[in-house]
Image: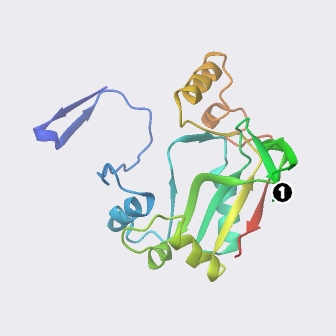
Amino acid sequence: DFELTGGGFDIRLYRRDIENWKITFVDTGLHSNIGQRLNAVRHYLAGDPVFLANYSDGLSDLSLTEYLDHFHRQDKICSFVCVRPRQSFHAVSLGDDSLVRDIRSIGGTDLWINGGFFAFKSEIFDYLKEGEELVEDPFQRLIGVEQLIAYRYHGFWACMDTFKDKQAFDDMDARGDTPWQVWKSANGGQPSHARAGEVPLRR
């Protein structure tokens, strides 16, 4: 509960469950892409050599401590979490004659996807031009100079892009199956079933 007064400049919290955090709310534009949103908050990051970002449409039990340890060991400009897709569709391999060569569940392939959790050094802005989408031209530039890595994550990850996804999360919450709530876990927020490794990305 909070009270907003003074034309929006004064906020009084009646209850809180956070520590001594500083939270800055920034209007980055309704139709901005990810690169534009990063550039919009750049001046708020001045003095921070490393920062985190995410798409905010997914939940995970990813250990940020382990993720950042890996990022610092690799000493690259950018890292993102890559995960196995959870969707139930099938991948199809076709020949030129339209004959199906192979069909299998996407979970049975070696496909990894961008999980939407990122770690950046401040140098990322040297590779991000105005108006560009982050994972397109900027990532290609980073790949070209071997400054982009991925953190392969085997723990819990799921995105919420559709109403069906929301229903699935609601059902999990109703039965107490909430692995993303790491602050409630007995092992201090460390995922107990996760395995991770690096995947250097090249052209």
Is label 1 in a helix, a strand or a loop? loop
Q: Quadrant of the N terminus?
A: top left
Residue at horizontal 55%, vertical 27%?
Answer: 166
- Left or right: where does residue 144 sit relative to residue 7? right
Percent from the top left, x then y, of residue 19? Answer: 44, 42
- Left or right: where does residue 101 sit relative to residue 65? right
Residue matched to label 1: 95
Residue at horizontal 77%, vertical 53%?
Answer: 111
Q: Is residue 195 visible?
A: no
- Left or right: where does residue 162 sit relative to residue 46? right
Q: Is residue 35 visible?
A: yes
Q: Amino acid at mark 1?
A: Gly
**How is the structure coloured here?**
rainbow
Percent from the top left, x then y, of residue 160? Answer: 55, 36
Q: Is residue 124 above or below residue 41?
A: below
Q: Quadrant of residue 95?
A: bottom right
Percent from the top left, x then y, of residue 129? Answer: 41, 75
* Residue nearest the observer in this picture, 185 or 40: 40
Q: Is residue 76 above or below residue 172?
A: below
For disc 1, the neighbor class at 10 Å (few under 14, some 14 to 19, many from 20) is few
Q: Quadrant of the C terminus?
A: bottom right
Q: Is residue 20 above or below residue 70?
A: above
